[in-house]
Amino acid sequence: MTATPNDLRTVDPQLADLITAEEGRQRDTLKLIASENYVSSAVLQASGTVLTNKYSEGYPGRRYYEGQQYIDQIETLAVDRARAVFGTEHANVQPYSGSPANLAVYLAAATPGDTVMGMALPMGGHLTHGWTVSATGKWFNAVHYNVGRETGRVDMDEVRDLALRERPKLIFCGGTAIPRTIDFPAFAEIAKEVDAVLVADIAHIAGLVAGGAHPSPVGHADIVTTTTHKTLRGPRGAMIMATEPYAKAIDKAVFPGLQGGPHNHTTAGIAVALHEAGTPEFSSYAHQIVANAKALADELQSRGFALSSGGTDNHLILIDLTSKGVAGKPAAQNLDRAGLETNYNAVPYDPRKPFDPSGLRLGTAALTSRGMAEAEMREVARWIDEVVSALASENSDTIEKTVGQVHGEVSELTGRFPVPGLG
Ligand SMILES: *Cc1c(COP(=O)(O)O)cnc(C)c1O
């Protein structure tokens, strides 16, 4: 950044230093957190603009404030691009993030006290699918399906039995730690049988769906919610897409039901991300994410790691470290010291506590955005193996030496793959 009288570095050097330090951290680490990504320079630019100055409660053409000549066009662009990329009848790009988007769905399609159904959080579901600590679990009668103890996969017969028994108003499919393809047609059939509204929460896989690397829920789910900042590679935000019968209720639920003015700078960033998502390059990126995850999974398995569900169909891998004699948290912490950023995560039927679980969750979207491919994934697997093996030795000298050595090798790799958005 070159300093001009009003720029951030001059006005607030303390904050500018922190951002610069975070830029360096992002450049120098391997981002393997499944919910994160690196956005393009274009998305960053659109997100950091004067659009943040504008209030625009309402929708294009129907606002409560004047001066919407350009904001209306920006939001309309974002909506049109969302509809084109995902092939949906209706799109709302105003939700502040994924959790408020899901809350808007409850407001649009259910009444407090209704029965709702989703995947259990410890099995890979999301808090907002009715988990107890979430408002959605407190205000609704939530029931949950699991994954098979042996298969690690959703058993559609179990889902159907639960739905027939509980007769939920809403059925959520999707989640945060699902390494396998979601069977949208099967969920749709069950929802139809029990007269439930099917909500596909594709927060994690939206980029794969947009790029044709995961089947689309469109045509099966009544309502589709997604964050915009995970595999879709946009700014932090969310969208709700729906069939025409739900369009009005969704819009009313987002505003005025739940939110005030939309974050127009974010809407602009979403529009840019959706423009990128419509390109052939994005489709290649989406397919490479899956190829990379498969390469990483194969190499981890050949090194004796146990993977939940035995592998992956998408961007996500859930390692069960139990057989390695190492817990998830120390593994994640020491991998981070070695330059590999992951998160510890519960595995299905985890005997350990959620804050100190058995698993490690990995995703390949961010490394794919840096241009890394299968060869780099095999290196990543080797480094994970080396750090975890060192931890299993419980020898602090071995641990320190291994972390240092891996960190050196990681630095060599990160130096060769620039971060999008950081030039
Ligand atoms: C990330 C995620 C959300 C929530 O998104 P936030 O932006 O963190 O509120 C909702 N549902 C699923 C399945 C997610 O993975």
Image (cartoon, helix red, strand yellow):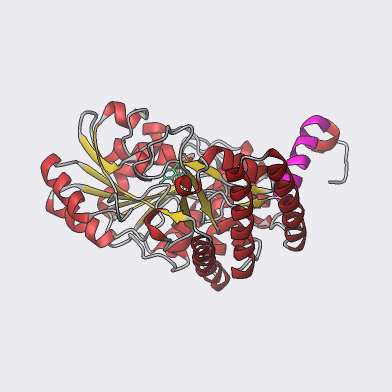
Residue sitting at 32 percent across and 29 percent down? 132
Residue sitting at 42 percent across and 63 percent down? 313
Q: Position of residue 282 (x, y in %)?
A: 55, 67
Instruction: Judge whether residue 69 can be spotted in this image.
Output: no
Main SS type for the magenta part?
helix
Residue 380 falls in image quadrant: bottom right
Above/below status of 163 relative to 302: above
Give yes or no for residue 77 being in the magenta stretch.
Answer: no
Marks counted in the figure total 0
Q: Position of residue 263 (x, y in %)?
A: 54, 40
Q: Position of residue 99 (x, y in %)?
A: 42, 38
Residue 415 falls in image quadrant: bottom right
Instruction: Judge whether residue 249 can be spotted in this image.
Output: yes
Quarter, ligand 1: top left
In the image: residue 416, left or right of residue 312: right
Task: Please state which of residues 323 and 92 is positioned toward the viewer in this rendering.
Answer: 323
Residue sitting at 57 percent across and 43 percent down? 331
Give yes or no for residue 19 being in the magenta stretch.
Answer: yes
In the image: residue 71, left or right of residue 194: right
Q: Position of residue 122 (x, y in %)?
A: 36, 40
Residue sitting at 14 percent across and 40 percent down? 166
Q: Which residues are magenta?
A: 12-26
Q: In which quadrant is the C terminus drawn?
A: bottom right
